[in-house]
Image (cartoon, rainbow, N blue to C red):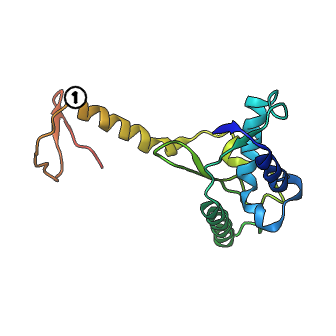
Amino acid sequence: VLRQMNSSDNHALKKSLIHLDTLSDELVPLAWYYQQVQKELDDKYSGLIGERKSCLYLALDPVMQSDAQQRVREVLTRLEERKEYPSKTLQGAVAAVDVKNGTTLALIGGRNYLTDTFNRAANAERQIGSLIKPFVYLSAMQELENHIVFQEKKILDAPLVRRIYGKRWAPLN
């Protein structure tokens, strides 16, 4: 949400500006989120930033952001110990989104922003594989609900054998 700033907003903003290259320890967990906000602002409003004073309200949940960063580190450390990977070699990412309005509440792009600033949550180009399946299935089930009236029906949980073109067929699962 952008709105015009007044002089007191401007003074408060100057005092609270976050520079990603000189983060204090307490702001490091927020760096991935701010990095993405900065990128999106540069991409969408690069010509406008600096010309007009605006106030930006973020959906960031600092507690969720900090908890997610800590959890990523814990899980990666456990995986490295269990699978005998060299310490601090694995990376991870988290994107927590409010399902009601699509705002990003937390964004973790890797293990430690101070040692690697690449944001895997926002910039990694990978196939999503099985991550998308629940959404596809849910969409299909919702579509079925719109067109089919489900009736209660008992389904026998027993081996299934059919004759197809004169040959016996039985699924193995």
Neighbourhood count class around disc 1 (C-alpha, 10 Å): few under 14, some 14–19, many 20 upward: few
The x, y position of residue 121, in whole percent, is 66, 47
The x, y position of residue 145, in whole percent, is 24, 35
* Whether residue 118 can be seen here: no
Image position of 66 (left or right of 86): left
The x, y position of residue 130, in whole percent, is 50, 45
Image position of 14 (left or right of 120): right
Image position of 133 (left or right of 88): left
Query: Which residue shows up at 84% across the image and 64% down it?
Result: 24
Query: Which residue shows up at 10% across the image and 49% down it?
Result: 154
Q: Amino acid at mark 1?
A: His
Q: Which residue is mark 1?
A: 147
| 49 or 115: nearer the viewer | 49
Query: Which residue shows up at 26% across the image and 44% down it?
Result: 171
| 83 or 103: nearer the viewer | 103
Query: Which residue shows up at 84% across the image and 56% down it?
Result: 15
Q: Quadrant of residue 53?
A: top right
Q: Residue furthest right?
A: 22
